[in-house]
């Protein structure tokens, strides 16, 4: 049975998308959706169907003190609309510094600045999805440590 998940790093213009393997163990960058040029909800619904995803993990940006700012409210509004287009469960997950981690990883791998800008959101999505998968495996299906959908 497939345990494939999609991870999303939602920005104002770009949505980074990552995918897990069929066992739900390893996350990999998949693509970046330009939300100004494409209908992100239709694109994500198509990806859920194409990969038969059992769930979506959406990064929720938190402020340094743990609160939610403007971007978190934007992500919550996006998820609210996304739920109208997708039937599988959607989990909000703390994306604590995943974009900064993605940037460092891409620099360390020798990626040029232009290439980094093209893939950073998908790499950040893979990092947050991997964090979720690791926590889920460590704590079983009742994972709550950084689950923010309350």
Image (spheres, helix red, strand yellow):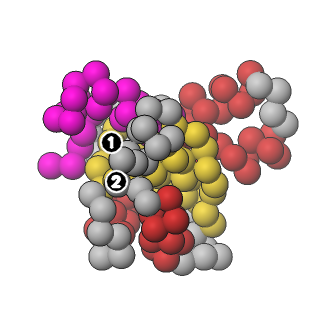
Q: Is residue 38 above or below residue 149?
A: below
> Which one is closest to the eye, mark 2 or mark 1?
2
Q: Which residue occupies the foreground of this view, 57 or 49?
A: 49
Q: Residue at x 35, y 54 (%)?
A: 54
Instruction: Decide if residue 130 is in sight here.
Output: yes
Q: Residue at x 36, y 75 (%)?
A: 85
Name the image quarter holding residue 31: bottom right
Give residue 53's position: percent from left, percent from top: 41, 56
Q: Which residue occupies the foreground of this view, 23 or 137?
A: 23
The residue at the far front in this view is 1
Q: Is residue 44 above or below residue 141?
A: below
Q: Which residue occupies the foreground of this view, 130 or 146?
A: 130
Q: Is residue 34 above or below residue 16?
A: below
Few, some or many C-alpha atoms within 10 Å of disc 2 (few <14, some 14-19, many ≥20)? some
Residue corresponding to mark 1: 93
Q: SS at mark 1?
A: strand
Give residue 92's position: percent from left, percent from top: 30, 48
In whole angstroms, how far apart are the C-alphas of marks 2 and 1?
12 Å
Q: Is residue 130 magenta?
A: yes
Give residue 16's position: percent from left, percent from top: 56, 52
Prevailing secondary structure class for the magenta stretch in the rendered image: helix
Give residue 6's position: percent from left, percent from top: 45, 51
Q: Is residue 35 magenta?
A: no
User: Where residue 55 is drawn, which disc sits there?
Assistant: 2
User: Where residue 38 is drawn, which disc sits there?
Assistant: none
Q: Which residue occupies the foreground of this view, 52 or 144?
A: 52
**Left or right, 6 with reference to 110:** left
User: Magenta segment, which residues?
Assistant: 127-150
């Amino acid at each position: 049975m497939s345990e494939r998940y999609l991870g999303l790093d939602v920005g104002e213009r770009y949505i980074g998308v990552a995918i897990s393997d069929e066992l739900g163990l390893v996350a990999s960058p998949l693509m970046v959706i330009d939300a100004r040029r494409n209908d992100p909800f239709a694109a994500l619904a198509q990806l859920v169907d194409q990969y038969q995803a059992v769930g979506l993990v959406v990064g929720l940006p938190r402020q340094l003190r743990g609160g939610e700012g403007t971007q978190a409210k934007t992500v919550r509004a996006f998820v609210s609309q996304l739920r109208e287009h997708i039937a599988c469960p959607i989990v909000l997950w703390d994306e604590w510094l995943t974009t900064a981690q993605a940037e460092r990883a891409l620099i360390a791998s020798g990626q040029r600045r232009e290439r980094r800008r093209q893939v950073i959101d998908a790499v950040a999505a893979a990092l947050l999805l991997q964090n979720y998968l690791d926590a889920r495996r460590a704590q079983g299906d009742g994972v709550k440590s950084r689950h923010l959908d309350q």
